[in-house]
Image (cartoon, rainbow, N blue to C red):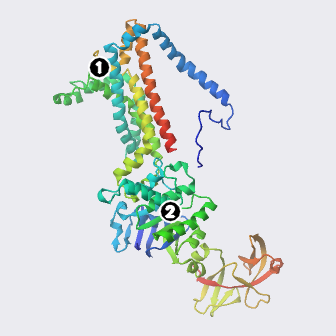
């Protein structure tokens, strides 16, 4: 590998030997416009019809703020939990050979495939105060179903495969020699994992986090069953949007949606920048 | 530090990779483990490092039995063919890693680690590259960083696994000379694995020739080249030609003719004669010599290599002649090997 010269300012990436740079770029832009940009600008346009004062009133409404806090907060916690346990699951799948490994591997994808409502109903049945797990937790004073904790659990379930599937392939590529070198230099297992392996996995882990988080913010089907949907307490923003729609209050629905959109976009952008930065650094 | 490998055997899932290997390495020595793929040279290196555990036998560092120690406790510097640098760390952090992971009072202060890293960078002639990442270095530079990292912990032994294998020929030659200089300057006991005999003979104080999980011969470059002690070493090191012969009455025979070589010590019977193609003496009158018809003649750099068919069974051997030697034009050439050796036929 040769050293790449530092890039000065902005410029288009040099087209490769594959022809049709103009054509493919044009197609990509047209496609993105059609699929993503037009519907989203329709959303903004719809909410703009509301006028600034009304928009502000909806945005600063206690119920809206609480719903947004619950949506983003629970998604964040669930993604963080998934980062830890998803990485451990990926580690076990990559590093160890045990009977049934393939089955466990396939099981990881189930949350992808399962209709989310089914997951929500199953989790509610388990964690309800009279359910298998709920009845064990109830004497300890822990209430899962119909609280934000239940939302977190549903989002953990939904988000797990995103982390596992992004971290797993990068983990498979870890060079055994890097670990061996760390050992000869005197690093114990813990130091090797913390200082050598995890930093190498960081970009993949951040991506997994971003995907799980984004999925969690938008999740609806599984959450509404377990959340109990108490306004101000366990009502998520997507549900609030649906409620407004059912009230034929389209302007308010689109306003909340626009706020969600802006918040999500900013967060994903930040995560993306972190990614680019770390890629540039580690090559 | 002295390293002693005592009767080590290593099996991988019942498949033996090393049979009963013993080797004494003197303190400060530069040793090459040389052999073809699958000869067990890398396995031996990894056993010394502690990256593998011997099935049987022991490895001593000085007087201590190192086979009971973990890799971390052995304090060896290991350099891999593909560098195995930590991608997310700068050059300086890579070199300082071994010191940073130490515990308690054995860990030098951060400033001292930084000073030591730039000192080592000077030694490997990469001064000023502390802040670079491995991806920003060339292959040769990366290997130097890997070596500096291994030396940072003041290892008892420095172990290099095909250190120049991934580099192109010119960088290789350059680094070879440079490694010799570094070794002479620092005096670390060093063992390196290679399948390149030129590298081994040029660089090492002593060469360990390995084949099929055993040590064939240990010796200096001169000893290995001039007095190979097995057909394998003769064939593996340098150019060699061989002929099936017979020993009778202390004389060496090809078919029914003596070839003018006396071997009073050799056992009677079938044997194989080995000699170097360039170490032959041409003779005009053949009474007691090897004679053959020229089957092919090739120009190789500064010499001409002639392939001869010998005797009724048309055994082929190669000899080397000066480019303009008249014999290369003839259809029949007679010669006598200068230095030669007989091994009983297997």
Q: Quadrant of residue A221?
A: top left
Does any portion of residue A251 appear in the rendered image? yes
Measure the C-alpha gap from mark 2 to mark 1.
Answer: 64 Å
Horizontal side, residue A106 vs residue A26: left or right: left
Q: Is residue B39 visible?
A: no
Task: Name the residue located 38 percent from the left edge and 48 percent from the top edge.
Answer: A193
Residue closer to the observer: B185 or B3 = B185
Within 10 Å of disc 2 (Cα), the crowding (few <14, some 14-19, many 20+) is some
Q: Chain of mark 1?
A: A
- Which quadrant would the C terminus of chain B be assigned to in this image? bottom right
Mark 1, other Cα within 10 Å: few <14 / some 14–19 / many ≥20: many
Indicate which disc residue A234 carries. 1
Locate residue A9 relative to residue A196 in the image: left or right: right
Where the N terminus of chain B falls, by quadrant?
Answer: bottom left
What is the chain identity of the residue bearing mark 2? Answer: B
Proximity of marks 2 and 1: CB atoms separated by less than 8 Å: no
List the residue tagged with mark 2: B123
Element under disc 1 = loop
The foreground one among A22 and B310 is A22
Task: Assign a secondary structure to mark 2.
Answer: helix
């Amino acid at each position: 590998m040769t050293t790449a010269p530092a890039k000065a300012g902005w410029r288009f990436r040099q087209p490769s030997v594959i022809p049709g740079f103009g054509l493919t770029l044009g197609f990509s832009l047209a496609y993105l416009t059609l699929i993503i940009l037009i519907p989203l600008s329709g959303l903004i346009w719809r909410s703009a019809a509301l006028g600034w004062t009304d928009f502000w009133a909806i945005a600063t409404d206690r119920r809206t703020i609480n719903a947004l806090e619950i949506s983003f907060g629970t998604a964040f916690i669930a993604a963080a939990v998934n980062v830890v346990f998803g990485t451990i699951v990926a580690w076990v799948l990559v590093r160890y050979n045990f009977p049934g490994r393939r089955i466990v591997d396939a099981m990881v994808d189930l949350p992808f495939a399962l209709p989310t409502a089914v997951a929500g109903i199953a989790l509610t049945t388990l964690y309800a105060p009279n359910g298998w797990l709920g009845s064990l937790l109830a004497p300890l004073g822990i209430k899962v179903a119909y609280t934000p904790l239940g939302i977190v659990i549903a989002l953990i379930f939904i988000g797990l495969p995103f982390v596992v599937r992004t971290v797993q392939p990068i983990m498979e590529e870890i060079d055994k020699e890097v670990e061996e070198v760390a050992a000869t230099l005197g690093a114990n297992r813990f130091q090797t994992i913390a200082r050598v392996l995890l930093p190498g996995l960081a970009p993949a882990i951040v991506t997994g986090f971003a995907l799980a988080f984004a999925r969690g913010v938008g999740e609806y089907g599984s959450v509404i069953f377990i959340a109990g949907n108490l306004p101000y307490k366990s009502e998520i923003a997507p549900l609030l949007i649906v409620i407004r729609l059912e009230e034929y209050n389209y302007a308010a629905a689109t306003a909340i949606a626009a706020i969600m959109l802006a918040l999500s976009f900013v967060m994903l952008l930040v995560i993306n920048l972190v990614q680019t930065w770390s890629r540039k650094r580690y090559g | 530090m002295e390293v002693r490998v005592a009767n080590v055997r290593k099996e991988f899932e019942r498949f033996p990779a090393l049979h009963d290997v013993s080797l004494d390495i003197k303190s400060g020595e530069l040793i090459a483990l040389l052999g073809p793929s699958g000869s067990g040279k890398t396995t031996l290196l990894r056993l010394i490092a502690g990256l593998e555990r011997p099935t049987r036998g022991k490895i001593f560092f000085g007087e201590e039995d190192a086979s009971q120690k973990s890799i971390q406790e052995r304090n060896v510097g290991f350099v891999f063919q593909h560098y195995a640098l930590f991608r997310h760390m700068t050059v300086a952090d890579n070199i300082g890693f071994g010191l940073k992971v130490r515990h308690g009072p054995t860990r030098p202060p951060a400033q001292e680690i930084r000073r030591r890293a730039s000192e080592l960078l000077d030694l490997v002639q990469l001064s000023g590259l502390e802040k670079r990442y491995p991806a920003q270095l060339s292959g040769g530079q990366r290997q130097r960083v890997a070596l500096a990292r291994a030396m940072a912990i003041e290892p008892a032994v420095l172990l290099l696994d095909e250190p120049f294998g991934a580099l192109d020929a010119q960088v290789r030659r350059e680094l070879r000379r440079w490694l010799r200089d570094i070794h002479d300057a620092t005096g670390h006991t060093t063992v390196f694995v290679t399948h390149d005999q030129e590298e081994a003979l040029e660089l090492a104080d002593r060469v360990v020739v390995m084949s099929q999980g055993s040590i064939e011969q240990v010796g200096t470059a001169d000893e290995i080249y001039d007095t190979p002690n097995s057909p394998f070493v003769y064939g593996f090191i340098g150019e060699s030609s061989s002929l099936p012969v017979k020993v009778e009455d202390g004389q060496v025979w090809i078919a029914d003719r003596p070839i003018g070589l006396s071997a009073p010590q050799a056992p009677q019977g079938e044997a194989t004669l080995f000699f170097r193609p360039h170490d032959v003496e041409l003779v005009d009158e053949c009474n007691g010599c090897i004679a053959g018809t020229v089957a092919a003649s090739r120009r190789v750099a500064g010499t001409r290599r002639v392939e001869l068919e010998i005797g009724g069974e048309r055994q082929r051997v190669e000899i080397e002649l000066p480019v303009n030697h008249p014999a290369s034009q003839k259809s029949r050439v007679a010669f006598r090997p200068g230095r030669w050796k007989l091994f009983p036929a297997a």
